[in-house]
Amino acid sequence: MSEEIKDTDVLKGGEFLVKETDPQSVFIPEELNEEQRMMAEVARDFVEKEILPKVEAIDKQEPGLTVRLLEKSGDLGLLGAAIPDEYGGLGEGFNTNTALSMELGAGYSFSVSFAVHTGIGTLPILYYGTEEQKKQYLPKLASGELKSAYCLTEPTSGSDALSAKTTATLSEDGNHYVLNGQKMWITNSGFADILITFAQVDGDKFTCFIIDANSEGFNTGEEENKLGIKGSSTRALFLDNVKVPVENVLGEIGKGHYIAFNILNVGRFKLCAMTTGSAKAIASNAIAYANGRKQFNQSISTFGAIKHKMAEQATRIFVSESATYRVSDLINNKIKELQNEGLKYEEAALKAAEEYAIECAMLKVFGSEMLDYVVDETVQIFGGYGYSEEYPAARAYRDSRINRIFEGTNEINRLLTVDMLVKRSMKGRIEIMSAALAVQKELMSIPDFANDMDKFLGAELKAIQNAKKAVLVIAGAAVQKLTESLKDEQEIIMNLTDMLIEVFACESAYLRTMKVSGMNNNSNLQSYIKMTKVYVSDAMERINISGKHAISAFAEGDDQKMLMLGLKRFTKYDYINTKNLRRKIADKLIEANKYCF
């Protein structure tokens, strides 16, 4: 499917902080075309008919079940949706694959098996493989004939992936490498046919290999007894003089870190898409239960405390979906732009995801923490039944927790966000410091009392613009004060990232609502307005708190007072009755008996 590139000035990665975005330039789920909706429906039907009725059997790892389901999803074209047609896939665009990821996110443990196979288990070959490797493996990965796993983590190397101890030694005849070492927490390892595996050549050249699971000396441990995602196969791997043909080196010797880190950009994005889809399904369970559960002679969904929970769940899901499709289209447009410049799809896709690595890291954090909120409140809405494994809330609660660890922990992603932003600023790719200096000068001037509040969502737009200034002034002051030592101040960096995430989330919700307001007869517009207002109101408080923590950690005396005054000025937002807004949001959910936005 061809997805059109919009004729607009597309923002660079991280540039949202210093530039305004035209609502008409963003992509929103309401714009999915008929073909994209049909593909999403195929994925939705697959989850509802093939996965959900079998969740107990999947969690018990019924022999062969996940393998058969992966093969069936391959028959439907779901495994190969992102693979170009010349390699046996469907060649669907990035926005289409985002829609598929959201639907498949509702598949509990199976979602993890699917995501690893189609993502980090396949994309390294698509992006870095030779033409021979692509032709050999991609058609079989797209059909499900081959299943894949990704082997990076070791007992002593998690977030510090480059400290891996697995070795690869070239044989005397130069025909193969001999691999020795151990990997752990490897998803799909119980049934994978090929494994994307990293090892040190000559002790210090981090390199990627494609390993055949039938290789002599390759063994797996027992299935891990995990807290959640019990249906996904997770084992330790043992490599004892495993011979890997030299033609199975993936990418270049000593450049495996490019594969390990760049593939994670797409993985982080897709994790947010899948957690958003999962949250929709779980929130729907909570709403239906609240409607049916009677206490004090009425449905508990009529109680204000429960309405608050349901409305907050829906608001965070709405924001996450808005941000996800916004970034999806940025990546999609960048792919098309690079293809127009002559790059092959796989090269363009890799570079596009790298361009928006900042946004992907923020989405990973936001989506995983959003889902954790949704499942936690779903358990609470179910009450005692939420603690019973006979109801869906318990499984959802357990399964959700891993997402804050997958694809780089949320702490690592928070640190990476600011690190990447500062580096791009230093290289002149984003004009961060000049924008920060401009805001510092503004702090010394008389505030602008121009009133745009009468405009549609004018107060929210003003709040978002000011929140960006709050980030700029505090980040700029931190860089000036701490210089090179800022990298060691992880708490301050995470405060700044939390502010950035809230700004991006607020703006994404605002942009979607603005765009929908220009569409004819959209029945959700009034709810979108309410959710945008609720989210911005609360986010400004969170930005203020994160800003206070950051300022207090590096500034003193007059500098601290000036920064605190600036923070107060730039996080001001008029009081609104969020209770009533939430109740109206909840009423729409109650009437639909599910998440309906």
Image (cartoon, grey):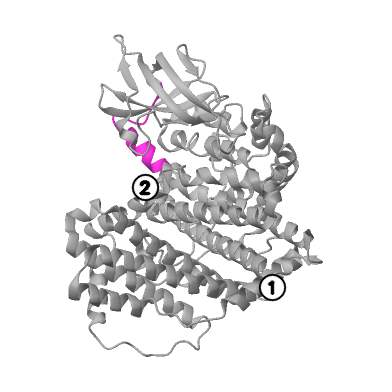
Type of residue at label 1? Answer: Ser
Closest to the observer: 423 or 336?
423
Quadrant position of the C terminus in the picture: bottom right
In this rendering, the count of numbered labels is 2
Element assignment for label 2 = helix
Q: Residue placed at 54% from the left, 69% from the top?
A: 512
Image-based side of 435 in relation to 237, left or right: left
In magenta stretch: residue 193: no
Residue wearing tag 2: 412
Image-based side of 514 in relation to 282, left or right: left
- In the drawing, what numbered circle is on residue 532? none
Q: CA distance from mark 1 to mark 2?
A: 40 Å
Type of residue at label 2? Answer: Ile
Residue 308 appears in view: yes
Q: Residue placed at 18% from the left, 73% from the top?
A: 557
Q: Mark 1, residues whose alpha carbon is within 10 Å: few (<14), some, or many (≥20)?
A: few
Decide: is 162 above or below 15: above
Closest to the observer: 459 or 434?
459
- In the drawing, what numbered circle is on residue 523? 1
Element assignment for label 1 = loop
Residue 341 appears in view: no
Q: Where is residue 313, by image quadrant?
A: bottom right
Q: Where is residue 441, by image quadrant?
A: bottom left
Q: Nearer the viewer, mark 1 or mark 2?
A: 2
For the record, the magenta segment spans 248-263
Residue 381 screen position, x and y as percent:
67, 58
Decide: is 272 above or below 304: above
Q: Where is residue 591, by image quadrant?
A: bottom right
Closest to the observer: 75 or 370?
370
Residue 305 screen position, x and y as percent:
64, 68
Residue 345 screen position, x and y as percent:
46, 45
Residue 37 screen position, x and y as percent:
67, 55
